[in-house]
Amino acid sequence: DSGVTQTPKHLITATGQRVTLRCSPRSGDLSVYWYQQSLDQGLQFLIQYYNGEERAKGNILERFSAQQFPDLHSELNLSSLELGDSALYFCASSVDSGRTDTQYFGPGTRLTVL
Amino acid sequence: AQKVTQAQTEISVVEKEDVTLDCVYETRDTTYYLFWYKQPPSGELVFLIRRNSFDEQNEISGRYSWNFQKSTSSFNFTITASQVVDSAVYFCALSEFYAGNNRKLIWGLGTSLAVNP
């Protein structure tokens, strides 16, 4: 158990809908990262937050957004969902964005868009 | 550009065999970090090891060992006396600078290891 929690574990929804994925980092970790893992594109970095502020952006679509709250938990919002958004979404956390800290991953949320 | 290549897409071995998973990376950074993660069939990503570019000592942890060779830009992972529980997808990752002093991970595509009884 990495100490990173993600909810829900599974999510099934329809095209065009909007969903919110939630992540709680390990105690003491200030950075949160979101990743998407699909069969055809491997593990893709989406976005990173550090202590409430956006720090780095990867291949995140405009239909997706994220935020990190004062209690350091983070939410990833996916809107206007398409079939291709079906994937495993991971959250990871680390202590400090300024150094190369190890990222510890949550169990993931498996999103299925029908 | 920085990238990580795991040339072996799938490997299948019989229990108790030794197996080496290859990882070759490219970077222009002089200071960088390399990682290995394991993703078992249950889906979670489990951290295995972190190595910085100034530490070329090989590391051993039980049946796992890692061989870091800067000269060939490789960071290979060997499982000795493999077990069925080692069946998983293994990812190699490289850190890169992003926006000042921040780093993000660049991931290989993973090697799927099947250990058969």
Image (tube, coloured by chain):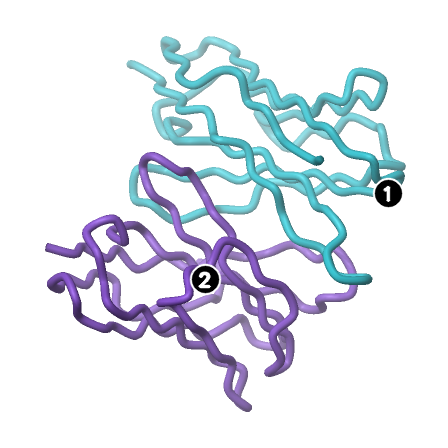
Chain colours: A purple, B cyan
**Toward the viewer: A70 or A66?**
A66
Q: Residue A18 sits in which quadrant? A: bottom left
Q: Quadrant of the N terminus of chain A?
A: bottom left
Depth check: give the residue in front, A47 or B90: A47
**Side (left or right) of A8 relative to B64:** left
Query: Residue A44: x and y, percent?
Result: 47, 47
Q: Is residue B13 left or right of residue B91?
A: left
Q: Is residue B100 above or below residue B36?
A: below
Q: What is the residue that sits farthest to the front in this orientation?
A: A62
Residue A22 placed where, x, y %? 36, 74
Question: What kind of residue is marked 1?
Answer: Thr
Q: Which residue is mark 1?
A: B31
Q: How far apart are the two marked residues, 2 and 1, measured between alpha carbons?
A: 26 Å
Tell me the element at label 2. Answer: strand
Q: Nearer the viewer, residue B19 or A39?
A: A39
* Residue shown at 42% from the left, 28% from the top: B86
Q: Which mark is residue A91?
A: 2
Crowding at mark 2 (Cα within 10 Å: few <14, some 14-19, many 20+): many
